[in-house]
Amino acid sequence: MDGPLVSIRFLELLAREASAVEFEGPIIQARASGADPATIEELERAKVEALKVRDLLKRRARREAELSALYDTAGDLAALRDLDAVLEAIVHRARQLLATDVAYMTLHDPERGDTYMRVTDGSISAKFRALRLAMGHGLGGLVAQTAVPYATADYFADARFRHREHIDDAVKEEGLVAILGVPLRLGQRVIGVLMAANRSARPFHQEEVSLLASLAAHAAVAIDNARLLQETRNALEELSQAHRTAREHGEAVERAAMAHDRMTSLVLRGGGIEDVAAVVTDVLGGSLAVLDDLGRAISGDVGELDSGVFEAAQASRALGRTVRRGDLLIASVDVGGEPLCTLLLRSDDADERILERAALVCALLLLFRRSVAEAEGRVRGELLDDLISRPGSPGLADRARRLGMDLGAPHVLVVAKHSGQRERAAFWASSQATLRHGLAAGRADEVVLLLPGDDAGGLAQRVARELTASLHSPATAGASRAGDPANVAAAYQEARRCAEALIALGRAGDGASASELGFVGLLVGDGRDVPGFVARTLGPVIDYDARRGTALVDTLAAYFGTGGSPSRTAEAMHIHVNTVTQRLDRIGKLLGEGWPAPERALEIQLALRLHRLGHTDTPDTMGPSTI
């Protein structure tokens, strides 16, 4: 085989990009045909040269492909405008170009002075994706610190960088072995690290390091361009938002001024809070409720309100502006630290200025009403003082009629003891008197009310409950029926004694008349209603004996007389102890649970004694006691 034929044969192999093994073919054939050693040696030299040419062609082809990929990458990155899309494209292209299992990018965090995992491609470990690398720690931290590329074929066996347990754990969980990292540089500043990694041992050649570094250079520029573009967009958006905000603010101010003019005009024409609320809902839509200082609705329907609404109203007064809670806008106004009115608005139009101006207008209306009420309250208080201290003074009935009262109708006098704010208590009492067409007067530690009705106990309880809620401290109310103007003074003394008795009994914050105080009522009440006391305390047992001919009253008297011993009761009455037990069970059903308790037992014993003395004439009894 001569030289030209040898060259042609190897050129043919190079032309069709044959594998390295095929280049042994001409030598094998020459040996088979009995070629001399010189020929074989020539073929060996030709093969070596041909393989060198083949490697050169392959490296040039690979380099051409890499340059083409870099060109395509640069074009792709230039077309992207979103920073996240830029970063994802860089990492994905790095993984493709180096044919690795994983590619990822860490960026520098100037606030914490470390790098954090920003984008990954091919990662499966959550711990790895959340990894942060301090400067000099791990391969990535080393690259970020030195701004020099580093590659390792076996990460865990490489001692050139500082291993940290949390970093090694994350790398182990991801299953990485071979890692290559190159810096992302902008001038002299390192902004991050671009890395490619394999889950098996693999050396990274210099061409691959150069390729990843070239991609990192493109990436750094693209990242900076995307950042600058995003900052420009943000600036434009902020400018546009500022313009919209200024325009909306101007429109809102103009609309609030128009609404304020409408509300002011209404007030000047004699309009009330309902008219102001109508203006607000006309402008803002939705529904509006106006509450007074006690949280009661003056206008609108509020439904059930939780404590959070009142906390928000308190915050509104403290801040001097509208507060939102859920779907409610809340504006509240106070005077001297005390709440005056609160507006609750449910509307999609959250124009707080209009609601706040409406709250101020409503507050002015309420202050005017309060001034009128205080003037009227002084008149009512003076009349009540005269009824108590000078019941025979002329003209009392005429003065009452001018206030819309008929002193000839049934009335209840209530005395409410309190330790709260005197002015607030007096204002509350005056408001109640005006609403219920009664009278009210304020004293040092009490308020006095004369209100239409005949349920003294029920009215005392209601006054105690509502005044306690208004003052946020216990108010104790005693009450007595006042039949005519001449009885008001006596009713005042009895009601006052009832209130003092409640406080002495440890029932501060409660309300009662003499009839609800049991035997204590006999001591503090002017009427000394003994039959009523006996009937309330012992009536069911007396009635049962009268209807059935039994001796439950006798048994009850003997039971208390023997110190509460069923056996001694049986001996005293000459009956079996089982009979005593059965009678006591019947008494328990008639008097209710708890009748042997000390306080209840004391009242029952007193009623038994009064019944024995014949001080009762209960309507259901058929005669005197059989004891």
Image (cartoon, rainbow, N blue to C red):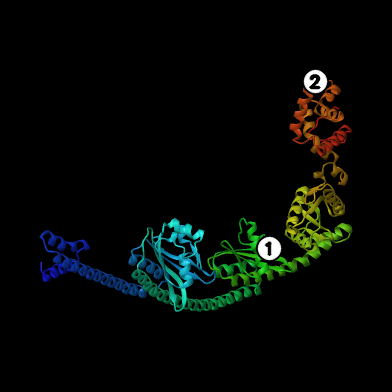
Residue matched to label 2: 576
Q: Amino acid at mark 2?
A: His
- All told, the count of numbered labels is 2
Dot 1: few (<14), some (14–19), or many (≥20) neighbours within 10 Å? some
Dividing the picture into quadrants, the one containing residue 65 is bottom left
* Three-letter code, disc 1: Asp
> Residue 319: x percent and y percent?
66, 69
Q: Earlier in the sequence, mark 1 or mark 2?
A: 1
Is residue 518 left or right of 181 when viewed as pictured? right
Q: CA distance from mark 1 to mark 2?
A: 67 Å
Where the N terminus falls, by quadrant? Answer: bottom left
Of 289 and 91, nearer the camera is 91
Horizontally, is 496 left or right of 180 in the view? Answer: right
The residue closer to the viewer here, 93 or 17, is 17
Q: Is residue 178 left or right of residue 482?
A: left
* Numbered tag placed on residue 292 in the rendering: 1
Question: Observer-nearest residue: 223 or 15?
Answer: 15
Q: Residue 251 placed where, x, y %?
A: 53, 77
The answer to whether mark 1 and mark 2 are in CB contact below 8 A is no
Q: Secondary structure at mark 1?
A: loop
Say which quadrant the C terminus sits in. Answer: top right
